């Protein structure tokens, strides 16, 4: 079966870049990305490529080449569904904020709405591809909805989770470690799997394209994120032990990472992991385990989140304690608000929770982030509902220039590992700061010795200050 028209529902951080690369590599397939968010679609269609709705290195070039050729962004959802032989569902699946499973389970309302819309519109057979991250066995629910349309249309459901990481999305899509496709173990199922394999095989070696049953594919996505997050929480747990024993977490990471069974990646101690995926997907895994009565399994994975929460709060508490147990009325500068470098995404960023804890102590925060807008920063804080929007705007300011942000500050806290922070004129920042001037490096990106030589009271994560401060 040769696919000529693809529709992708959801033009977000996954749908946008994924479909852009897929269209780039398959010029003979017409790829239409749809979304109900008109503003987002308008931004994807903006002739000024700097106005794309998401920032990802390399994305502009891909969009420039494919958009208008065989890549289209539109709000005409029904038309695109009708015309496509293959439909990707790439809508958001946030943690539920209401009802049963509140705070844990994935909210599948957008998935169900997408399935119902496909069921309503489809007049010809379709392959429906789950691109969103979903609880294991969601394909069954989608199939139930689609198979009860009564119009004779046949549907095949595939699971094709996305493993891209933000900030490296284009690189990850161009050269993924693997592509995972789960499908039904029937002739029709195999035909659908082959159709999707053919699309990826235009640029990805076949041996990297894994095919499995649907449930293994759905579950593997949750498990991959749980394992990655677990590594960060594990090294962060050790960072606290390093601080009290005189060990250096960077040296420990290096020493254990050289064991080929452990490997060197994802052992970077930090102020805590953020992002829209790790927490949401682990909570979902915990919820699924609980719903099958697997208490020990649920408790085991929940600990990864608890450790991460502890790391964020510990960072904030350390700032308060080092600033002589009070930050009330003191200016604290945040360098970075995004959950990692090279993205404008702030979902679940550690910065939000550290800021909230410090604002509770009446600190006055000024934030500088090279890619995150003022509007986004206030929206993140307001969402917590800890204090009124007016209060948030009174206590927290957003600066457009890092030196301005650091002027007359009591402490600089590095929350995101943006490369540009390393090349700042730190002598100049020191000169303009209130003394003693503190730097709390939540990403261990600066050189401790040079920072101390400049005069800073420099604190990093997982590195003992036993003899230094
Ligand atoms: P996102 O919020 O950036 O984008 C989702 C988009 O879907 C939104 O623009 C929303 O308006 C649109 N949408 C929702 N319901 C719709 C409907 N009925 N019709 C049309 N459009 C609709 O989310 P995202 O970060 O792209 O994540 C999408 C999925 O991919 C999630 O399940 C997520 O867990 C998974 N995922 C995300 C990442 C990541 O790095 N962000 C990586 C891998 C997997
Ligand atoms: C993650 C997965 O990596 C990706 O495969 C999946 O598709 C989506 O979720 P993402 O959240 O975009 O990707 O970024 P990732 O690079 O995994 O970082 C997540 C968080 O962990 C960030 O806050 C990052 O700063 C933090 N992190 C990562 C660390 O603190 N230390 C590390 O060693 C690695």
Image: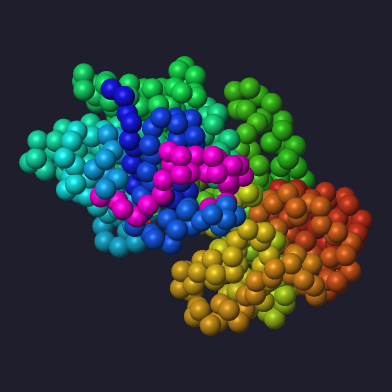
Check the picture and name the quadrant holding the C terminus: bottom right
Which span of residues is magenta-colored?
A: 52-78
- The correct choice, above or below, for 317 with respect to 300 in the image is below
- The correct choice, above or below, for 58 with respect to 362 in the image is above
The image quadrant of residue 30 is: top left
Which residue ends up furthest to the top in the rendered image?
207
Left/right placement of residue 231 relative to residue 23 reads right
The image quadrant of residue 440 is: bottom right
Which residue ends up furthest to the right in the rendered image?
453
Q: Residue 438's spot in the image, x, y percent?
A: 79, 65
Of residue 332 and residue 85, the one placed in the foreground of this image is: 85
Q: Residue 354's spot in the image, x, y percent?
A: 60, 64
* Residue in the picture at 19% in, 33% down: 125
The image quadrant of residue 38 is: bottom left
Of residue 442 and residue 370, the one placed in the foreground of this image is: 370
Q: Residue 255's spot in the image, x, y percent?
A: 72, 30
Of residue 340 and residue 130, the one placed in the foreground of this image is: 130
Colour scheme shown: rainbow
Magenta highlight on residue 252:
no
How many marks are shown on the rendered structure? 0
* Residue in the picture at 66% in, 42% down: 268
Q: Is residue 212 visible?
A: no
Of residue 167 and residue 303, the one placed in the foreground of this image is: 167
Check the picture and name the quadrant holding the N terminus: top left
Magenta highlight on residue 58:
yes
* Residue in the picture at 63% in, 22% down: 260
* Residue in the picture at 79% in, 51% down: 422
Q: Is residue 458 visible?
A: yes
Left/right placement of residue 340 relative to residue 290 reads right
- The correct choice, above or below, for 194 with respect to 139 in the image is above
């Amino acid at each position: 079966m040769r696919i000529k028209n693809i529709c992708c529902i959801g033009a977000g951080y996954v749908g946008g870049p994924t479909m852009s690369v897929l269209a780039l590599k398959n010029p003979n397939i017409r790829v239409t990305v749809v979304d109900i968010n008109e503003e987002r679609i308008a931004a994807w269609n903006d002739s000024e490529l700097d106005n794309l709705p998401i920032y990802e290195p390399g994305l502009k070039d891909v969009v420039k080449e494919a958009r208008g050729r065989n890549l289209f962004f539109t709000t005409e959802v029904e038309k695109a569904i009708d015309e496509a032989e293959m439909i990707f569902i790439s809508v958001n699946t946030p943690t539920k904020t209401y009802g049963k499973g509140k705070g844990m389970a994935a909210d599948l309302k957008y998935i169900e709405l997408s399935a119902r819309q496909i069921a309503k519109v489809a007049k010809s057979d379709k392959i429906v591809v789950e691109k969103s991250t979903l609880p294991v066995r969601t394909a069954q629910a989608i199939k139930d909805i689609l198979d009860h349309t009564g119009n004779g249309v046949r549907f095949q459901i595939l699971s094709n989770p996305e493993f891209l990481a933000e900030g490296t999305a284009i690189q990850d899509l161009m050269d993924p470690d693997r592509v995972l496709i789960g499908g039904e173990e029937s002739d029709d199922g195999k035909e659908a799997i082959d159709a999707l394999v053919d699309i990826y095989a235009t640029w990805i070696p076949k041996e990297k394209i894994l095919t499995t049953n649907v449930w293994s594919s759905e579950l593997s996505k949750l498990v991959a994120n749980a394992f990655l997050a677990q590594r960060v929480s594990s090294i962060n747990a050790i960072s606290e032990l390093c601080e009290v024993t005189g060990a250096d977490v960077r040296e420990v990471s290096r020493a254990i990472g050289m064991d080929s069974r452990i490997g060197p990646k994802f052992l970077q101690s930090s102020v805590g992991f953020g992002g829209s995926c790790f927490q949401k997907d682990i909570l979902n895994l915990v919820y699924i385990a609980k719903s099958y009565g697997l208490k020990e399994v649920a408790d085991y994975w929940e600990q990864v989140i608890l450790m991460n929460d502890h790391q964020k709060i510990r960072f904030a508490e350390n700032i308060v304690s080092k600033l002589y147990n009070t930050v009330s009325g003191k200016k604290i500068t945040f360098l970075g608000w995004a959950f990692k470098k090279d993205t404008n995404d702030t979902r679940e960023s550690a910065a939000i929770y550290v800021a909230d804890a410090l604002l509770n102590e009446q600190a006055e925060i000024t934030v500088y982030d090279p890619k995150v807008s003022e509007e986004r920063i206030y929206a993140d804080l307001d969402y917590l509902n800890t204090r009124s929007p007016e209060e948030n705007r009174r206590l927290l300011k957003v600066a457009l220039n890092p030196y301005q942000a650091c002027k007359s500050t009591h402490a600089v806290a590095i929350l995101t590992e943006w490369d540009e922070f390393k090349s700042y004129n730190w002598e100049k920042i020191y000169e303009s700061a209130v003394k003693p001037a503190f730097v709390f490096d939540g990403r261990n990106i600066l050189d401790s010795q040079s920072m101390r030589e400049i005069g800073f009271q420099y604190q990093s994560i997982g590195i003992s200050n036993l003899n230094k401060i």
